Amino acid sequence: MYTFSNRLRTAAFVLMIVGALGLVYGFFAAPSTEAEAMAMVADAHHGEDHGAATTHAAEGEASHGEAHAEQAHGEEAHGAETHEEEHGSNHGEHLLHQLQNKPWAALYVSAFFFMMISLGVLAFYAIQRAAQAGWSPVLFRVMEGITSYLVPGALIVFVILVLSGLHMNHLFVWMDPEVVAHDALIQGKSGYLNVPFFLVRALIYIGGWGAYQYFSRKFSVAQDTASDDSNFKKNFRISAGFLVFFLVSESMMSWDWIMSVDPHWFSTLFGWYVFASMFVSGITVIAMITIYLKSKGYLEFVNDSHIHDLAKFMFGVSIFWTYLWFSQFMLIWYSNIPEEVTYFVTRIEDYKLPFFGMLVMNFIFPLLILMNSDYKRLNWFVIMAGIVILMGHYVDIFNMIMPATVGDQWFIGIAEISGVLFFAGLFIFVVFNALTKAPLLAKRNPYIEESKHFHY
């Protein structure tokens, strides 16, 4: 039985406290009036042009203010030209919304990122169960521990969505009646993109995921003391059924919770793209926690071949993610349809470093580090690759959310770092606390002996 060390528990609480304080500061530091928002942008611009002459700086600030008004308005309206024409003089309001969105967006990105790790692990776990895999049962309790974060993590995301529907923020522009009133395209999607139906769908997703997580864990633990394989068979059946539900709900979730922040843009590959990101992130966390537990003397039956297979999945799914990213990007870039290409133009122009940086972290780095079969057996190599992969996919979610919510007013600041710290602490506490609730070896699983002696 795993014992949650006081040192790790304390570290989790420290991360949560520091993160919570930073998030509170981020919300209080956000401007409350249009004048404050304009002053913050003017000060930032003045800081960038500090070495210039006074007259040049004044002209630069004036031109920047005009250009930024157009950009800020365009981001808030998500490319709606009619909205830009009617509200071009209200650039201060849109700039205010962008700066007020910044702590909300930072909170949302971090909340979604850690929730999607748990959801990715749940999908991987269900695949192992449905496939009746022989190599992975010694890792089942690690997977079950990670999936214990799914319900609390998803409920936090749901609360943010509810607050968005109550107009506490401007993350989802289609929730703003003023915008919808002047946007024919969003009006055409209002049968699907409306707050009540949006929240009902979210509850269905979370309810389905949570039900499978609860019953799969229940049957898994019950199998330890059972005299037959009935619980194992139940887990097989519900896992097969869950995968059907997951494929549908995950795609719709990605449309609702991420793609709808850009309601004028869509991609038929987007559900798969988000799935690849959550899948590789989840597998990476399985590998990292497994290596940590083994270093502390637990999981004695986990060997180098198990780590090798996890690293092989990390490598393979990273390549799959790259294939989906390139397929989506190449087709949109090549066709050059204005309604589609604006999505990438915004990110390349205003988010050049995170946009191209994530390609290095999510593709080139795993390709070079994990291609060699021997390196997949080296724990420190897998940990190093895992850290970079997780950072890369956080930046990927950052790139999906930030351009539509904060425009070019982005930077990695206190709110962004604090969001990661808070949810990392919460994730560690929930997961490692769950690991203490049952033995780390699923001893009555029919394939446990095969898994113990697995060798690649």
Image (spheres, helix red, strand yellow):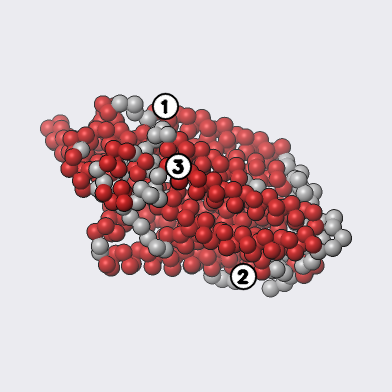
The label number, if any, that marks residue 213 in the structure image: none
Give the residue number, with chain letter if any, for mark 3. Answer: 196
Q: Which amino acid, mark 2? A: Asp
Q: Nearer the viewer, residue 313 or 227?
A: 227
Q: Nearer the viewer, residue 131 or 293?
A: 131
Q: Where does the image place residue 246, in percent across and percent down from the top left?
A: 56, 58
**Considering the numbered disc 2 on the image, is that residue within a helix, a strand or a loop?**
loop
Q: Is residue 231 left or right of residue 190?
A: right
Q: Is residue 36 left or right of residue 26?
A: left
For marks 3 and 2, give the CA distance. 52 Å
For discs 1 and 2, the disc positioned in front in the rendered view: 1
For marks 3 and 1, give the CA distance. 29 Å
**Considering the numbered disc 1 on the image, is that residue within a helix, a strand or a loop?**
helix
The label number, if any, that marks residue 374 in the structure image: 2
For discs 3 and 2, the disc positioned in front in the rendered view: 3
Q: Where does the image place residue 163, in percent across and percent down from the top left?
A: 45, 35
Task: Say which residue appears at 20% left-offset and 46% top-offset.
Answer: 82
Q: Which amino acid, mark 3? A: Pro
Q: Where does the image place residue 327, in percent across and percent down from the top left?
A: 38, 67
